Image (tube, rainbow, N blue to C red):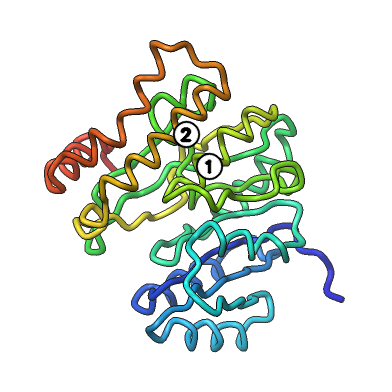
Amino acid sequence: MKNKPSISIIMSVYNNQETLDACITSIQNQSFIDWEFIICNDKSTDSSLEILKQKSQQDNRITVLNNKRNMGLAYSLNKCLSTVRGRYIARMDADDISKSDRLFKQYTFLETHKSVDILGTAMFISNGERVQGIRRQDKIVQKSSFTKGSPFAHPTVMFRSDIVSVLKGYSTQVSRAEDLELWFRAYKNGFKGENLQEPLYIYHESIEDYKKRNLKAAIATSRVFLHGYKMLDFPLRERIFALKPIVSAILPDKLLKSIHEIKLEEV
């Protein structure tokens, strides 16, 4: 039996053959080396599984799980969580890059700040050709942070494994808001979080990502917000913020992308 690693990184993959090698390599190049990388292939139809098998053969810290049919992100992440052994759990997305000191800096912070359970980071936003700017979220995540949107950038987070023990993972009953729903339950159960203001992650965001939006998913996300606001006892006047995903879904893709780009900080 292998010694338990300090960090378990979890990731779902679905048809990411173009970006998968660079993504995994960014984890292999981390200055912090005491990790395991658990990756669930969600029934990809491209060569993603072959790439994963090759990577796992080259590096025994990488474990590949395989869904027999496409099950979605929440199910796949829960499958990863069922096998984790680390004290800390980190997220990663298959089309993104982690800076080489990401794991070290998050691990060091959590080791020295015992009151923090969830730790995100700022991130560079890239359109695939160049970095367009930096996106930061509240340093100290308080209840009010939820009125601005999801208080953590999901793929940047590292959190204590206790959260999984208490909350039993991601809900599979929500659409594209599994992280937000988890954070609401975490705060309801007394867990706390922060965001490092240093960008330690390169997040891919192009016009194609905006085109994937749809009103049905936005309505489902608004329901998660509304349920979460009730859960955390938000006053009625603040629950109006639950409508933000629906308003965003109605806006043209290029307009919403431009609005988000204006909000980015310069590199």
Picture layout, residue 131 above or below residue 260: below
Q: Quadrant of the N terminus?
A: bottom right
Q: Quadrant of the C terminus?
A: top left
Residue denoted by label 2: 151
User: SS class of the residue under badge 2?
Assistant: loop
* Nearer the observer, 77 or 206: 77
- Give residue 208's quadrant in the image: bottom left
Left/right of residue 94 with respect to residue 101 in the rendered view: left
* Nearer the observer, 125 or 46: 46
Label 2 with label 1: CB-CB less than 8 Å? yes
Picture layout, residue 16 above or below residue 213: below
In x, y percent, where is residue 69? Answer: 50, 76
Residue type at numbered disc 1? Gly
In x, y percent, where is residue 175? Answer: 43, 50
Q: Which mark is residue 120?
A: 1
Q: Residues within 10 Å of mark 1 (few under 14, many from 20)?
A: many
Left/right of residue 176 with respect to residue 109 in the rendered view: left
Residue type at numbered disc 2? Pro
